[in-house]
Amino acid sequence: MQPLQDLQGRKFPYLRLSVTDLCNFRCNYCLPDGCLDHHHSEALTIDEVRRLVTAFASVGVEKIRLTGGEPTLRQDFSDIVRTIKQIPGIKKLAMTTNGYKMDQRVTDWLDAGIDAINVSVDSLDPRAFELITGHNRLREILSGIQNAFDHGLPSIKVNAVAMKGINDDELDAFLDWIRDYPVSVRFMELMQTGNNLEFFQKHHFSGKKIQELLLERGWVRKVRLYDAGPAQEYCHSNYEGTIGLIMPYSKDFCNDCNRLRITSLGQLQLCLFAESGIDLRDLLQSDGQQEELLARIRDSLRLKEDGHFLDQGWTGGTQSISQVGG
């Protein structure tokens, strides 16, 4: 069957699937007051997830990333993983987590079938970590990362939102950490959303400043893989780990977009900052709806814009990143 493609010729082997919009952290850049508005109890069922992923797999999607909110707040998270792993065509199943109870649960995630993990670690300083997230859980997250390695996972990606005046002085600490540790640290630019304008204006820190420092120190940009996320990744012969930079405000950031998003309520998001989603849930109620589902997905791709409008201060309907899993 013909792979998914938009009017710009971009193809989409990668689907980010939110399984809940509930999060139990209070990150200052996302949910500083906690997750007060969510639809956790209304999230897609396992059967709806199976039908959705089956449809996308039939048109070239090979990589699924489970996101939230915090996806592991689903009591049936491991069952969702096992279900997706049985779907033909899916070659890689990844997850993004805040690391909550990761030290206790990561082996269960891997045994269920998770192939790759992204975990948020916005600071390696316990005090700064608690200031950012509202939780004193850095030790258990770092322990969880080590448990994953001990259980056979070859590498882990760590997400860190770079923020001026909060953690922008920690580059050397992260570099020291990955000198002999196979972690890929992804520094992400703080993005403006509907509810964080004042915070964004005060703390936005350009990833280009980190890029310049890396190049000055001999880091080299790696070739981007077909199903990779948006990060520009850099390596150095003296380091076991790597550094990735996610810079959505950089020129031509959207040219290589290769991913689509599904919200926990079954809406197709053509962009993280789209005004609204396209509802697919009514076509996830029986196995016999696959052709109609695929037709709606293909028609929807005709609406995908060339790029976002973040540089113009336009954030669409995205009030917080937790809504659609980043």
Image (tube, rainbow, N blue to C red):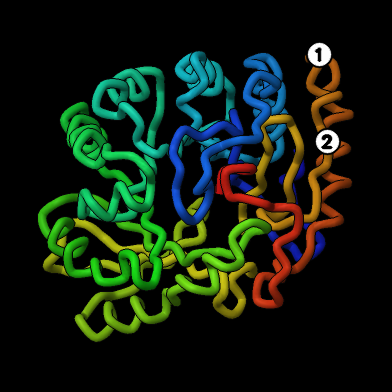
Could you tell whether 215 is left or right of 6 in the image?
left
Could you tell whether 310 is left or right of 131 in the image?
right
Q: In this view, does 77 lie above or below 175?
A: above
- The quadrant where residue 178 appears: bottom left
- Name the amino acid type tagged 1: Ser
Camera-side residue of 208 and 165: 165
Contact between marks 1 and 2 (CB within 8 A): the answer is no
Q: Mark 2 points at which residue?
A: 279
- The quadrant where residue 141 appears: top left
Q: Residue at x 25, y 75 (%)?
A: 219
Camera-side residue of 154 and 145: 145
**Residue 48 seen in render:** yes
Q: Where is residue 136 in the image (x, y as percent from the top left)?
A: 27, 39
Q: Is residue 298 above or below residue 188?
A: above
- Name the amino acid type tagged 2: Asp
- Secondary structure found at label 1: loop
Q: Where is residue 189 in the image (x, y as percent from the top left)?
A: 47, 67
Q: In this view, does 106 lie above or below 187?
A: above
Q: Position of residue 18 (x, y in %)?
A: 60, 35
First in residue order: circle 1 vs circle 2: 2
- Secondary structure found at label 2: strand
Q: Position of residue 304 (x, y in %)?
A: 79, 58
Rendered image: mark on residue 255: none
Mark 2 crowdedness (10 Å alpha carbons): few <14, some 14-19, many ≥20: some
Q: Mark 1 points at which residue?
A: 286
Q: Which residue is drawn at 70% across and 67% down?
A: 308
